[in-house]
Each structure stands twice: as C-alpha cells, then as structure tokens.
Image (spheres, helix red, strand yellow):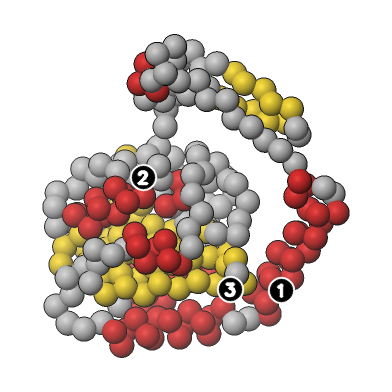
Amino acid sequence: MRKNVKGLVAITDQYLPFREPVVEIGSYQVPGQEKLADLRPLLGEKAFIGCDMRAGPGVDRIEDVEGLTFSTGTVGSVIMIDTLEHVRDPRRALAEVYRVLEPDGVVVASSVMDFYIHDHPADYWRFTPEAFAYLFEPFDQVLVGWQGNPEKPHTVFVVAVKEPSVDHAAALREIQEAYRRSNGTPYWRMAQVYYALRDLAANLRGWNNRFGFELVARGTAGSAASLGQHSLPQIQTVGATLQVKSSGTPSPS
C-alpha cells in the first residue's frame, strides 16, 4: 500500500460514494504495513469485506479474484489497490469483478509500472495506462490516471462505474482534480528525484546489465499439465548464477 493510492480511495468515496457492501480484493496486510494498508477507517460504518487468497491481517474472506464466490450483482463497490500485478489472469479477474458488481457499482484499482519486483506472494505484471484502459473496457464510465514520469509512471489507476443510472462524468473530473491537488506536494516531487537517483546508482553499480534466466521444466512429454498446475520449478537467481530447485510437491498459489 502506498500513500498516494490510499488517498485515491478516500477521494473517490468523497465524490463518488462507495455503495455497500464494499469489497477489497487484496486486503492482506503485509508485515510492517498493517496500519497503512487498513482502508476500513476511511469508509466509516460502511459494510466492508476484506478478501485475499490467503488468511491473515485484514482478511475477512478467502477469495480467488479469478473465480469469486459472490453471487452476480451483489457487491456495491470493489477496491483493488496495487493488486492486479499479483494476479495471473487480470482479464479474467476483471470479468469476475464486473459480474459481481451491481449496476452503478464503483471499482477503484491501482497498480505499479516503474517499481521493483515484489512478491506478495507473486509478481506477474506491469501496466501502462493503455493496458488499464483495455482491461476496464466493459465498464461504461472510466477514469484512467497515472502519476510520475510520463515515460515511465510509478502509478497507474482507474475509477470505473458499471451501468451507471446517471452521468458521473462531473464526479470523475472532481476525482481527477482532487487527486492532482493532493499529490502535487514536495513529497511526490522529491519522489521523482529518488527514482532518478535509484536508476543512476543502478547504472554505476552495473546492475542495469545483469542477467537472470529461468529454466522451466515441462515434463518429458513437453506438457506443463504433466507436472500439475503449480509444480513448476522454484527458481533462485543469485547474481549471475542460476540455481534451479525441483518442486516435488505442488506449492500453493
């Protein structure tokens, strides 16, 4: 969880109030972020269900976003903050989110682009603004935003409405301007300096020309299915040295 996208949740609820129940996908609070990642205080007394694929702090209900167990049209709003990069099939996940949302339902989602690999528990994707526009095509009114260097923003986000009964264009413009005001601060201007210095340091240390490889075993018949759904080898890369550990027992996704 990052401060800018947590603020996006509060801003959206101010101008386009979340309908209940509010479902957060990816609500697991990783160690050290328990307070920062807690969205419940932002929403007051609204019915809130924290969902994640694993049990832990902030999780009320175990859910796989690619196959949600909520009935169709029973969820008022969905929040997915810095979650979609950890989902194997984002297109399928968004189809499920669309299905469970009721008409006039709101979804707020964010993800990272210029950001390090972070396993919570796995890290699959980096999204451009165009990618988010594509993923949220089924929704009727969509605000796509980004923050950072225009050539490689650190944040990409969406506020979208399913089958709106009224025009929410004015509210989406208010969200856009409120987000701009709240993040046009010295803190976020200095963040760009940090990203530039990070890249410079990586160049000086030679990190921008290191190598990593993955040898993925597919079984003797050349079929991934022969190993089971989650039986791919576990890869550990240390510097330029590749270590491959065979996975004898399928590990949980």
Q: Residue at x 49, y 13 (%)?
A: 248
Q: Amino acid at mark 1?
A: Met
Task: Please name the residue that numbered disc 3 is placed on.
Answer: 150
- The amino acid at mark 3 is Pro
Tag 1 secondary structure: helix
Q: Residues within 10 Å of mark 1 (few under 14, many from 20)?
A: few
Q: Nearer the viewer, residue 44 or 96?
A: 96
List the residue tagged with mark 2: 89
Q: CA distance from mark 3 to mark 1?
A: 16 Å
Give coordinates of residue 177: x percent, y percent: 45, 86
The nearer-to-camera label among 2 and 1 is 2
The structure residue drawn at horizontal position 38% and vertical position 20%, both measured from the top left corner, is 223
For disc 1, the marked residue is 190
Q: Quadrant of residue 73?
A: bottom left
Label located before the other in sequence (3 or 1): 3
Camera-side residue: 173 or 136?
Answer: 136
Residue 48 visible? The answer is no
State yes or no: discs 3 and 1 in contact (Cβ < 8 Å). Answer: no
Task: Label 2: state its secondary structure.
Answer: loop
